[in-house]
Image (cartoon, rainbow, N blue to C red):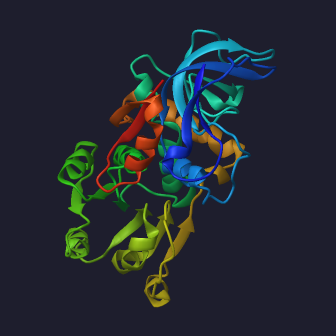
Amino acid sequence: MKAVRVREFGPPEVMKLEEMADLKPEAGEVLVRVKAVGVNPVEVYIRSGTYGNLPALPYTPGSDAAGVVEAVGAGVRRVSPGDRIYIGWSRSGTYAEQAICLESQVHQLPTKVTFEQGASLNIPYSAAFRALWQRAKALPGEVLLVHGASGGVGVAAVQWARAAGLTVIGTAGSEAGRHLVSEQGAHFVCNHHDPDYLKEILAITEGRGVDIILEMLANVNLGNDLKILAPDGRIVIIGSRGEVEINPREAMAREATLLGMLIMKASDKEFVSIHAAIAAGLEKGTLNPVVGKTMALGEAARAHREIMSEGSFGKIVLIP
Protein backbone atom coordinates (compact mmCIF):
# COMPACT_ATOMS: atom_id res chain seq x y z
CA MET A 1 0.00 0.00 0.00
CA LYS A 2 0.97 3.66 -0.34
CA ALA A 3 1.28 5.93 2.69
CA VAL A 4 2.60 9.40 3.48
CA ARG A 5 5.62 9.15 5.76
CA VAL A 6 7.40 11.79 7.84
CA ARG A 7 11.03 10.98 8.66
CA GLU A 8 11.97 14.39 10.09
CA PHE A 9 9.96 17.31 11.47
CA GLY A 10 9.92 20.38 9.29
CA PRO A 11 8.14 22.09 6.36
CA PRO A 12 5.35 20.43 4.37
CA GLU A 13 7.84 18.87 1.96
CA VAL A 14 9.08 16.43 4.64
CA MET A 15 5.94 14.40 3.87
CA LYS A 16 6.74 11.79 1.22
CA LEU A 17 4.46 9.23 -0.43
CA GLU A 18 6.07 5.81 0.05
CA GLU A 19 5.29 2.17 -0.67
CA MET A 20 4.75 0.06 2.45
CA ALA A 21 3.72 -3.51 3.27
CA ASP A 22 -0.02 -4.08 3.62
CA LEU A 23 -1.31 -3.91 7.19
CA LYS A 24 -2.93 -6.76 9.14
CA PRO A 25 -5.24 -6.39 12.15
CA GLU A 26 -4.46 -8.03 15.48
CA ALA A 27 -6.95 -8.87 18.23
CA GLY A 28 -9.34 -5.98 18.88
CA GLU A 29 -8.23 -4.13 15.74
CA VAL A 30 -9.95 -3.16 12.51
CA LEU A 31 -8.27 -2.86 9.11
CA VAL A 32 -9.81 -0.10 6.99
CA ARG A 33 -9.45 0.45 3.25
CA VAL A 34 -9.23 4.25 3.27
CA LYS A 35 -11.34 6.10 0.70
CA ALA A 36 -10.88 9.68 1.95
CA VAL A 37 -8.67 11.45 4.51
CA GLY A 38 -9.53 14.59 6.48
CA VAL A 39 -6.77 17.19 6.91
CA ASN A 40 -6.66 19.13 10.20
CA PRO A 41 -4.47 21.99 11.48
CA VAL A 42 -3.18 19.84 14.36
CA GLU A 43 -1.43 17.65 11.79
CA VAL A 44 0.41 20.73 10.53
CA TYR A 45 1.67 21.54 14.02
CA ILE A 46 2.79 17.95 14.60
CA ARG A 47 4.57 17.70 11.24
CA SER A 48 6.37 21.00 11.85
CA GLY A 49 7.61 19.78 15.25
CA THR A 50 5.90 22.58 17.21
CA TYR A 51 3.18 20.48 18.87
CA GLY A 52 3.47 19.60 22.55
CA ASN A 53 3.21 15.82 22.09
CA LEU A 54 5.18 14.53 19.12
CA PRO A 55 5.14 10.99 17.69
CA ALA A 56 8.26 8.90 17.23
CA LEU A 57 9.84 9.15 13.78
CA PRO A 58 9.07 7.95 11.19
CA TYR A 59 5.30 8.16 11.28
CA THR A 60 2.24 8.44 9.06
CA PRO A 61 0.19 11.59 9.78
CA GLY A 62 -3.54 11.81 10.17
CA SER A 63 -6.39 11.32 12.62
CA ASP A 64 -9.51 11.35 10.43
CA ALA A 65 -10.63 9.26 7.47
CA ALA A 66 -13.49 7.26 6.03
CA GLY A 67 -13.59 3.99 4.17
CA VAL A 68 -14.64 0.37 4.22
CA VAL A 69 -13.77 -2.29 6.78
CA GLU A 70 -11.43 -4.75 5.05
CA ALA A 71 -10.77 -7.17 7.91
CA VAL A 72 -11.19 -7.44 11.67
CA GLY A 73 -9.11 -9.03 14.40
CA ALA A 74 -10.28 -11.49 17.01
CA GLY A 75 -12.90 -10.17 19.39
CA VAL A 76 -14.21 -7.36 17.20
CA ARG A 77 -18.02 -7.26 17.30
CA ARG A 78 -19.21 -3.74 16.42
CA VAL A 79 -18.18 -3.77 12.75
CA SER A 80 -17.73 -6.38 10.00
CA PRO A 81 -15.89 -6.52 6.66
CA GLY A 82 -17.74 -4.44 4.09
CA ASP A 83 -19.11 -1.88 6.58
CA ARG A 84 -18.84 1.80 5.65
CA ILE A 85 -17.19 3.66 8.53
CA TYR A 86 -15.53 6.89 9.53
CA ILE A 87 -12.36 6.92 11.62
CA GLY A 88 -11.76 8.88 14.79
CA TRP A 89 -8.00 8.38 15.28
CA SER A 90 -6.04 5.26 14.44
CA ARG A 91 -2.99 3.27 15.46
CA SER A 92 -1.22 3.60 12.14
CA GLY A 93 -2.09 7.10 10.81
CA THR A 94 -4.68 7.88 8.16
CA TYR A 95 -2.70 9.51 5.32
CA ALA A 96 -2.57 6.10 3.64
CA GLU A 97 -4.47 3.56 1.58
CA GLN A 98 -4.98 1.41 4.69
CA ALA A 99 -5.32 2.16 8.39
CA ILE A 100 -5.31 0.04 11.53
CA CYS A 101 -7.78 1.19 14.20
CA LEU A 102 -8.98 0.02 17.55
CA GLU A 103 -12.61 -1.10 17.46
CA SER A 104 -13.58 2.00 19.47
CA GLN A 105 -12.02 4.26 16.83
CA VAL A 106 -14.37 3.33 13.97
CA HIS A 107 -17.97 4.45 13.62
CA GLN A 108 -20.74 3.52 11.20
CA LEU A 109 -21.17 5.89 8.23
CA PRO A 110 -24.70 6.19 6.77
CA THR A 111 -25.02 5.46 3.07
CA LYS A 112 -26.31 8.99 2.41
CA VAL A 113 -23.02 10.44 3.69
CA THR A 114 -20.12 10.37 1.21
CA PHE A 115 -16.68 9.11 2.16
CA GLU A 116 -15.35 12.65 1.68
CA GLN A 117 -17.92 13.93 4.17
CA GLY A 118 -17.14 11.05 6.52
CA ALA A 119 -13.48 12.04 6.51
CA SER A 120 -14.60 15.53 7.60
CA LEU A 121 -16.37 14.38 10.75
CA ASN A 122 -14.12 13.38 13.60
CA ILE A 123 -11.99 16.30 14.77
CA PRO A 124 -14.21 19.16 13.49
CA TYR A 125 -17.50 17.84 14.85
CA SER A 126 -15.94 16.43 18.02
CA ALA A 127 -14.19 19.73 18.76
CA ALA A 128 -17.33 21.79 18.08
CA PHE A 129 -19.49 19.51 20.24
CA ARG A 130 -17.01 19.54 23.10
CA ALA A 131 -16.62 23.33 22.94
CA LEU A 132 -20.35 24.04 22.85
CA TRP A 133 -21.86 21.45 25.17
CA GLN A 134 -19.09 19.93 27.31
CA ARG A 135 -17.12 23.13 27.96
CA ALA A 136 -19.40 26.17 27.45
CA LYS A 137 -22.59 24.37 28.58
CA ALA A 138 -24.51 26.20 25.84
CA LEU A 139 -28.26 26.63 26.23
CA PRO A 140 -31.05 27.20 23.70
CA GLY A 141 -31.82 30.90 23.41
CA GLU A 142 -28.25 32.05 24.06
CA VAL A 143 -26.31 34.11 21.52
CA LEU A 144 -23.24 32.41 20.08
CA LEU A 145 -20.38 33.99 18.12
CA VAL A 146 -18.31 31.58 16.03
CA HIS A 147 -15.10 33.40 15.16
CA GLY A 148 -13.78 31.91 11.93
CA ALA A 149 -16.97 30.05 11.09
CA SER A 150 -16.04 29.00 7.54
CA GLY A 151 -13.49 26.36 8.57
CA GLY A 152 -14.21 22.75 9.48
CA VAL A 153 -14.80 23.33 13.22
CA GLY A 154 -16.68 26.57 12.53
CA VAL A 155 -19.09 24.95 10.08
CA ALA A 156 -19.72 22.12 12.55
CA ALA A 157 -20.38 24.59 15.37
CA VAL A 158 -22.86 26.58 13.30
CA GLN A 159 -24.77 23.42 12.38
CA TRP A 160 -24.81 22.10 15.97
CA ALA A 161 -25.87 25.42 17.47
CA ARG A 162 -28.56 26.32 14.94
CA ALA A 163 -30.20 22.91 15.38
CA ALA A 164 -30.18 23.37 19.18
CA GLY A 165 -31.93 26.76 19.22
CA LEU A 166 -29.08 29.23 19.75
CA THR A 167 -28.88 32.54 17.91
CA VAL A 168 -25.76 32.16 15.79
CA ILE A 169 -23.41 34.90 14.60
CA GLY A 170 -20.54 33.72 12.39
CA THR A 171 -17.53 35.56 10.98
CA ALA A 172 -15.47 34.89 7.86
CA GLY A 173 -12.89 36.87 5.94
CA SER A 174 -13.92 36.16 2.35
CA GLU A 175 -17.17 36.62 0.48
CA ALA A 176 -17.26 32.90 -0.33
CA GLY A 177 -16.68 32.07 3.31
CA ARG A 178 -19.46 34.36 4.50
CA HIS A 179 -21.85 32.84 1.95
CA LEU A 180 -20.96 29.37 3.24
CA VAL A 181 -21.55 30.37 6.87
CA SER A 182 -24.95 31.80 5.95
CA GLU A 183 -25.85 28.60 4.08
CA GLN A 184 -25.03 26.52 7.16
CA GLY A 185 -27.63 28.36 9.22
CA ALA A 186 -25.99 31.36 10.89
CA HIS A 187 -28.57 34.06 11.62
CA PHE A 188 -25.99 36.81 11.10
CA VAL A 189 -22.63 36.82 9.28
CA CYS A 190 -19.91 39.44 9.71
CA ASN A 191 -16.64 40.18 7.92
CA HIS A 192 -13.89 40.02 10.53
CA HIS A 193 -11.67 42.14 8.26
CA ASP A 194 -14.13 45.04 8.52
CA PRO A 195 -12.79 47.56 11.08
CA ASP A 196 -16.31 48.00 12.47
CA TYR A 197 -17.37 44.36 12.74
CA LEU A 198 -17.23 44.38 16.55
CA LYS A 199 -19.65 47.32 16.60
CA GLU A 200 -21.85 45.37 14.20
CA ILE A 201 -21.94 42.40 16.59
CA LEU A 202 -22.85 44.67 19.53
CA ALA A 203 -25.58 46.24 17.42
CA ILE A 204 -27.00 42.79 16.59
CA THR A 205 -27.24 42.06 20.32
CA GLU A 206 -28.63 45.54 21.07
CA GLY A 207 -25.52 46.34 23.08
CA ARG A 208 -25.75 43.38 25.45
CA GLY A 209 -22.99 41.30 23.86
CA VAL A 210 -22.81 37.58 23.09
CA ASP A 211 -23.14 34.78 25.63
CA ILE A 212 -20.59 32.40 24.10
CA ILE A 213 -17.63 32.87 21.76
CA LEU A 214 -15.88 29.97 20.04
CA GLU A 215 -12.43 31.31 19.24
CA MET A 216 -10.27 29.72 16.52
CA LEU A 217 -7.47 32.34 16.55
CA ALA A 218 -7.10 33.53 20.13
CA ASN A 219 -3.73 35.21 19.64
CA VAL A 220 -5.42 37.71 17.30
CA ASN A 221 -8.93 38.05 18.72
CA LEU A 222 -9.04 37.26 22.45
CA GLY A 223 -8.54 40.82 23.69
CA ASN A 224 -11.39 42.12 21.52
CA ASP A 225 -13.60 39.11 22.30
CA LEU A 226 -13.77 40.20 25.92
CA LYS A 227 -15.14 43.59 24.88
CA ILE A 228 -18.20 42.10 23.16
CA LEU A 229 -18.99 39.47 25.75
CA ALA A 230 -22.27 39.62 27.70
CA PRO A 231 -22.31 39.44 31.53
CA ASP A 232 -21.39 35.92 32.68
CA GLY A 233 -20.27 35.14 29.12
CA ARG A 234 -17.92 32.32 28.18
CA ILE A 235 -15.10 32.16 25.66
CA VAL A 236 -13.88 28.75 24.52
CA ILE A 237 -10.37 28.86 23.06
CA ILE A 238 -10.19 26.25 20.32
CA GLY A 239 -7.16 27.52 18.39
CA SER A 240 -4.23 29.90 18.84
CA ARG A 241 -0.98 30.47 16.99
CA GLY A 242 0.90 32.52 19.56
CA GLU A 243 0.69 34.72 22.63
CA VAL A 244 -1.78 37.53 23.25
CA GLU A 245 -2.11 40.43 25.67
CA ILE A 246 -5.51 41.06 27.28
CA ASN A 247 -6.95 43.52 29.78
CA PRO A 248 -8.10 41.43 32.77
CA ARG A 249 -10.51 44.18 33.79
CA GLU A 250 -12.65 43.37 30.74
CA ALA A 251 -13.08 39.86 32.11
CA MET A 252 -13.64 41.10 35.66
CA ALA A 253 -16.36 43.58 34.64
CA ARG A 254 -18.34 40.81 32.92
CA GLU A 255 -17.43 38.03 35.36
CA ALA A 256 -16.38 36.22 32.21
CA THR A 257 -15.14 32.66 31.96
CA LEU A 258 -12.22 31.72 29.69
CA LEU A 259 -12.21 28.02 28.81
CA GLY A 260 -9.46 26.14 27.05
CA MET A 261 -10.41 23.17 24.87
CA LEU A 262 -8.37 20.26 23.57
CA ILE A 263 -10.36 17.43 22.05
CA MET A 264 -7.78 14.89 23.21
CA LYS A 265 -8.61 15.81 26.82
CA ALA A 266 -12.11 14.35 26.47
CA SER A 267 -12.75 11.26 28.56
CA ASP A 268 -13.86 7.93 27.12
CA LYS A 269 -17.39 8.65 28.36
CA GLU A 270 -17.36 12.08 26.70
CA PHE A 271 -16.19 10.57 23.41
CA VAL A 272 -19.08 8.10 23.54
CA SER A 273 -21.47 11.05 23.90
CA ILE A 274 -19.79 12.94 21.07
CA HIS A 275 -20.04 10.12 18.54
CA ALA A 276 -23.59 9.25 19.60
CA ALA A 277 -24.55 12.86 18.91
CA ILE A 278 -22.76 12.79 15.54
CA ALA A 279 -24.66 9.63 14.59
CA ALA A 280 -27.98 11.23 15.53
CA GLY A 281 -27.15 14.42 13.66
CA LEU A 282 -26.24 12.53 10.50
CA GLU A 283 -29.41 10.44 10.74
CA LYS A 284 -31.64 13.49 11.19
CA GLY A 285 -29.78 15.56 8.60
CA THR A 286 -28.90 18.40 10.97
CA LEU A 287 -25.20 17.69 10.40
CA ASN A 288 -23.91 18.00 6.87
CA PRO A 289 -20.10 18.16 6.52
CA VAL A 290 -18.88 20.60 3.87
CA VAL A 291 -15.95 19.50 1.71
CA GLY A 292 -14.17 22.56 0.39
CA LYS A 293 -11.51 20.86 -1.71
CA THR A 294 -10.24 17.38 -2.57
CA MET A 295 -6.64 16.52 -3.48
CA ALA A 296 -4.69 13.38 -4.23
CA LEU A 297 -2.91 11.71 -1.29
CA GLY A 298 0.43 12.67 -2.83
CA GLU A 299 -0.54 16.35 -2.52
CA ALA A 300 -0.42 16.30 1.28
CA ALA A 301 2.21 19.07 1.34
CA ARG A 302 -0.05 21.35 -0.68
CA ALA A 303 -2.96 20.52 1.61
CA HIS A 304 -0.91 21.52 4.67
CA ARG A 305 -0.02 24.85 3.10
CA GLU A 306 -3.58 25.61 2.08
CA ILE A 307 -5.28 24.67 5.36
CA MET A 308 -3.24 27.34 7.15
CA SER A 309 -3.86 30.03 4.52
CA GLU A 310 -6.33 32.89 4.81
CA GLY A 311 -9.63 32.34 3.08
CA SER A 312 -9.75 28.53 3.16
CA PHE A 313 -13.22 27.13 3.91
CA GLY A 314 -14.82 23.78 4.46
CA LYS A 315 -12.66 20.69 4.78
CA ILE A 316 -9.64 19.75 2.71
CA VAL A 317 -9.79 16.04 1.94
CA LEU A 318 -7.09 13.76 0.50
CA ILE A 319 -8.09 10.90 -1.79
CA PRO A 320 -5.81 7.81 -1.81
Q: Is residue 131 left or right of residue 29?
A: left
Residue situated in front as seen by the camera: 141 or 151: 151
Which of the 4 quarters of the picture holds residue 91? top right
Q: Give the answer, above or below, for where 191 lies relative to 126.
A: below
Relative to 66, residue 5 above or below: below
Residue at 73% x, 17% y is 24
Q: Is residue 136 left or right of residue 181?
A: right
Work out whether residue 164 can be spotted: no
- Seen from this angle, which residue lies furthest top? 82
Residue 145 locus on image (x, y percent) = 35, 62
Q: Quadrant of residue 45?
A: bottom right
Residue 76 visible in the picture: yes
Residue ID at (49%, 87%): 248
Q: Position of residue 154 (x, y in %)?
A: 38, 51
Q: How many numbered marks have been drawn onto this rendered protein structure?
A: 0
Residue in front for this viewpoint, 81 or 17: 17
Q: Quick one: which residue is furthest to the bottom in this view?
A: 249
Toward the viewer: 250 or 150? 150
- Image coordinates for residue 260, horizontal then vertical, percent: 57, 65
> Which residue is located at x 48 percent, y 36 percent?
38
Image: 113 above or below 205: above
Q: Position of residue 314 (x, y in %)?
A: 34, 42
The quarter of the image holding the N terminus is top right
